[in-house]
């Protein structure tokens, strides 16, 4: 493991995010295996939340299906998820979670989807995560989309 990967591994254990990742994986009855560069891969997660094929908590990358199959379909996905593990380091661990939720909300207001203007997803590489960028919309369009009986 490289020095950088060791730093990330140690930081995410120290800040509690990897421990939470193990708890989430265990709660979702995922199978845990060691992955590359200090990551842990949790396959077969059984909950419907969050709505994503894969997500990262600390150094634990969780997916609903099988990692090998997911890698064949999306060869850059693990690189994208590893970037999220670095984001946990930068945010000091668990503060990443509310910051990420805020970024989801901001993106939805600006584009009508949760990732296009989410700074964390953009910095991890939208295309590597399998996302397509949507155009920015006006605040008026955002307001119309949440009022009943109006078009957005």
Image (cartoon, grey):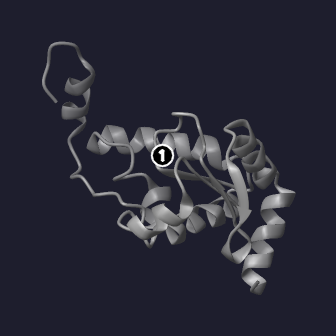
Q: Please identify the residue farthest to the right as the structure is shown.
A: 14
Q: Please identify the residue farthest to the top as the structure is shown.
A: 148
Between 55 and 71, the one nearer to me in the picture: 71
**Residue 84, how many percent across, how many down?**
58, 61
User: In the drawing, does residue 128 fall left or right of residue 100?
Assistant: left
**Residue 113, how many percent across, how many down?**
32, 42
Between 14 and 70, the one nearer to me in the picture: 70
Say if 57 sits above or below 149 in the image: below
Give the residue drawn at x 70%, y 67%: 39
For mark 1, what is the residue? 103
Q: Please identify the residue farthest to the bottom as the structure is shown.
A: 2
Give the residue drawn at x 21%, y 13%: 148
**Residue 115, how many percent across, how many down?**
38, 50
Give the residue drawn at x 20%, y 25%: 144
User: In the drawing, does residue 56 fall left or right of residue 137?
Assistant: right
Q: Secondary structure at mark 1?
A: helix
User: In the drawing, does residue 1 fall left or right of residue 147?
Assistant: right
Residue 109 is drawn in which quadrant? top left
């Amino acid at each position: 493991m490289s020095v950088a990967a060791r730093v990330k591994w140690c930081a995410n254990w120290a800040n509690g995010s990897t421990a939470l990742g193990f708890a989430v994986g265990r709660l979702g009855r995922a199978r845990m295996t060691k992955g590359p560069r200090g990551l842990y891969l949790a396959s077969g997660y059984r909950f419907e939340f969050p709505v994503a094929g894969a997500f990262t908590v600390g150094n634990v990358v969780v997916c609903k299906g099988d990692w090998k199959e997911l890698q064949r379909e999306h060869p850059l996905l693990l690189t994208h998820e590893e970037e999220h593990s670095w984001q946990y380091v930068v945010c000091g661990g668990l503060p990443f979670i509310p910051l990420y939720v805020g970024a989801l909300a901001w993106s939805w207001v600006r584009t009508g989807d949760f990732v296009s203007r989410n700074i964390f997803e953009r910095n991890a590489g939208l295309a590597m995560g399998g996302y397509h960028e949507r155009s920015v919309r006006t605040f008026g369009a955002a307001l119309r989309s949440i009022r009943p009986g109006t078009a957005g």
